[in-house]
Image (cartoon, rainbow, N blue to C red):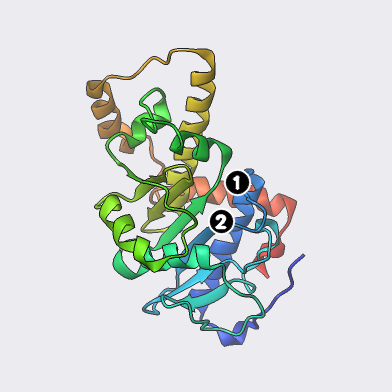
Amino acid sequence: MATAILSRPEITAAEWEARQQLAACYRVFDMLGWSEMIYNHITLKVPGEEGAFLINPFGLHFSEVTASSLVKIDIDGNKLSDSPYGVNRAGFVQHALFHRHLPDAHCIMHTHTTAGMAVSSLEGGLQPISFYACNFQGQIAYHDFEGVTVRDEEGERLLANLGKKRVMLLRNHGILVMGKTLPEAFIKHWSLQRACEIQLATLSMGQPLPVSDEVVAVHQRDLHMAQVPGGPGAADFAAMVRKVDRIDTSWRE
């Protein structure tokens, strides 16, 4: 299990709160089965620090991440806090790109879940065949696979393909979502993952029953009526953190 790296006096209260929220998120992802060995990333901007964000230490499993072991870096990949851990370039290049160019991308999540990779590898991508899939119709960007994301020059194409959308399926690769808050990004990822899981199950049974464009429009119009107060994903994420705490509270360290 990872041990604490930073002492509390070295960081602001706002940064510590962000660290705890992000560490909790890594544990939630692991609890939900979204870990991928020591790979994949969730990043979060540091409040009040321009160009600084937190990322998981390369080499730790999601289940080992703690608030103090998260690495603070700038958008050029330089460490801004003392840490014995490095950062995976395959995660840094992509996440730094979006943090640099998209002011509203406060939190960015990228995973290689089986369902997410399967749907991203399917011609036509996500289809309007379930409640959750209808959430995303017309809101998903796609980017063709170009190999492992370690080359800066791919960034221009990633940004161009993303456009004004904040949810992307990286073809043959996986899920990428962004949010103005971590809970918002979380509920987007959870909903998209569910949509992909349901599509995987439905297509295995036969011909899916598509939802019409007219019904999709009504569904998206009325979605806000089913949200709990507190902001997108806030109550959902809090519920998942409570579940994690019943298993292990070491992420708080």
Q: Going 30% across and 28% down the picture, which residue do you hit?
A: 219
242 shown above or below 225? below
Q: Going 62% across and 67% down the picture, which residue do you hit?
A: 58
207 shown above or below 141? above
Q: Going 66% across and 51% down the picture, which residue do you hit?
A: 244
Spot occupied by residue 100 in the image (x, y as percentages of width and height): 34, 70
Q: Residue furthest right?
A: 1
Query: For this view, does 90 lie left or right of residue 166?
Result: right
The disc, 1 or 2, on the residue closer to the chain's N-terminal end is 1
Q: Which amino acid does the dot numbered 2 rest on?
A: Asn
Of residues 124 and 224, the one nearer the viewer is: 124
Q: Residue furthest front?
A: 146
Q: Which amino acid does the dot numbered 1 rest on?
A: Trp
Q: Are marks 1 and 2 in contact (CB under 8 Å)?
A: yes
Mark drawn on residue 187: none
Mark 1 is surrounded, within 10 Å at the Cα level, by few (under 14), some (14 to 19) or many (20 or more) other residues, namely some
Q: In what element is the residue under mark 2?
A: loop
88 shown above or below 192? below
Mark drawn on residue 34: 1
- C-alpha distance separating marks 1 and 2: 9 Å
Q: Quadrant of the C terminus?
A: bottom right
- Residue labelled with disc 2: 40
Q: Going 59% across and 50% down the picture, which residue do you hit?
A: 29
Using the rendered view, name the quadrant where residue 208 is placed. Answer: top left
Of residues 227 and 96, the one nearer the viewer is: 96
Of residues 240 and 136, the one nearer the viewer is: 136
Spot occupied by residue 52 in the image (x, y as percentages of width and height): 43, 76
Q: Quadrant of the N terminus?
A: bottom right
Query: For this view, does 129 lie left or right of residue 62?
Result: left
